[in-house]
Image (tube, grey):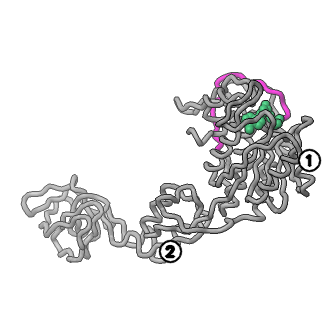
Amino acid sequence: MLTYDQARQSVVDEVSKKKGPRSTAAVSIWESIGYVLAQEIKAEREYPPFDRSTRDGYAVRANDAHTGATLRCAGEIKAGDNATTPLERWTCMQIMTGAGVPPGADAVVMIEHTQRKGDSVNFDRSANPGQNIVPRGSEAKRGQIVLTPGTRIGYAEVALAAQVGATEPLCAVKPRVAILSTGDEVVLVDQKPGPFQIRNSNSVSLAAQTKAAGGEPVLLGNARDRAEDLRAKIERGLREDVLVISGGVSAGKYDFVESVLKTLGAEFFFDAVAIRPGKPAVFAKCRDKFVFGLPGNPVSTMVTFELLVRPAIDLLNGADPRPLPLLRAMLNKLMKEKPGLTHFLPARIEWQGADPQVTTLEWRGSGDLAALAQSNSFLVFPADKEELPAGEFVHVLLRKDVI
Ligand code: AMP
Ligand code: MG
């Protein structure tokens, strides 16, 4: 049985063969957060476009402004003013943050280090050439590539695109992720369940996780635990880039997902992973589309999506797979688990003191959404351990959706 790292790697290896977006489209920068860039973005001029003052103070020739010197103030430059009048020797110009440094000046002295009487400015300390000036072109040269294809667009990236005037960057069209739940006990979320039925919460969480991962959810509803219904709905799902199925992958008499996929000619890369929850997770390729069969218990579905499906969505956006958001934290209490599987246990991580501290939550197993909703992370309990003492440093998988 594969470890979760090996299973993830197998997903990465397979999906990498089809890395890249299905198509590209221009997206307004206002809407582009979470998209992956599909073009190079270049600086259309020098950055900064002029020698920029980073302080409020006086533009000087460093040679003239030594400790105790007095210079005549020859004018004022506000941010946005044309800074074209050269600075004469033995003079200075009052300058604001963000303004252009005049020709001839090579330093800016902070206002705090000066005293002004009328037109005379006295300097408390010597200026060094270059101080408080960001030279023209030092952040980016004209034509320089500032963002490359495959870059995930976050708030810094939109700001940079905006800065260089790329207001409609070409982005990867998000991969379409078909979401299919299974089970005769499952009713749609807006229906009233019978006494032994449950609402389809997995389709809701999978859609949320798909969006957070950068995919476009395509909801296919629920399939009955019958091979014919499952087959028809799986065939529908195979029209999308990825198909994620919840439930029906265990060893039960009515778990038909794997057998139906087989009849459709699927190639299986794995059908079990050494994790709990989530052990029966399946990854296959069918009619050239990627299929994930995730166990139906809500927490199993969530954990296996985070571990296995996310990297596929990254690759199909043309990006490198993001690493798992793992952090080291100090365990608050003694923990015991059955060895052989890596356990992902709902936990809370808190930041008090020097090291983050992690505490696992009481839960009733992988159907317990009420416990999970109190968590902000999963403690990763290693497969080769039986016991972890309090005070031990452990890995914690962050729930980035709530942290
Ligand atoms: P399965 O993987 O099909 O054996 O299902 C395992 C458990 O998850 C059972 O208790 C199911 O009722 C439950 N389950 C399956 N599908 C869903 C779903 N879509 N939403 C919520 N719970 C589900
Ligand atoms: Mg089922």
Which amino acid, mark 2? Answer: Gln
In the rendering, which numbered label is found on residue 259? 1
Quadrant of the snapshot with the N terminus: top right
In the rendering, which numbered label is found on residue 144? 2
Q: Which residues are magenta?
A: 325-342
What percent of the width, then of the height, locates residue 304? 75, 42
Query: 237 or 104, which is in the foreground?
Result: 237
Q: Report the side of 91 relative to 348 (left or right).
A: left
CA separation in Å, label 2 and label 1: 53 Å
Quadrant of the displayed image that contains ligand 2: top right
Q: Report the side of 54 relative to 311 (left or right).
A: left
Q: Report the side of 11 relative to 36 (left or right).
A: right
Label located before the other in sequence (2 or 1): 2
Q: Report the side of 400 relative to 251 (left or right).
A: left
Seen at 49% across and 68% down, the residue is 168
Magenta stretch encompasses residue 87: no
Question: Which structural element holds mark 2?
Answer: loop
Which amino acid, mark 1? Answer: Ser
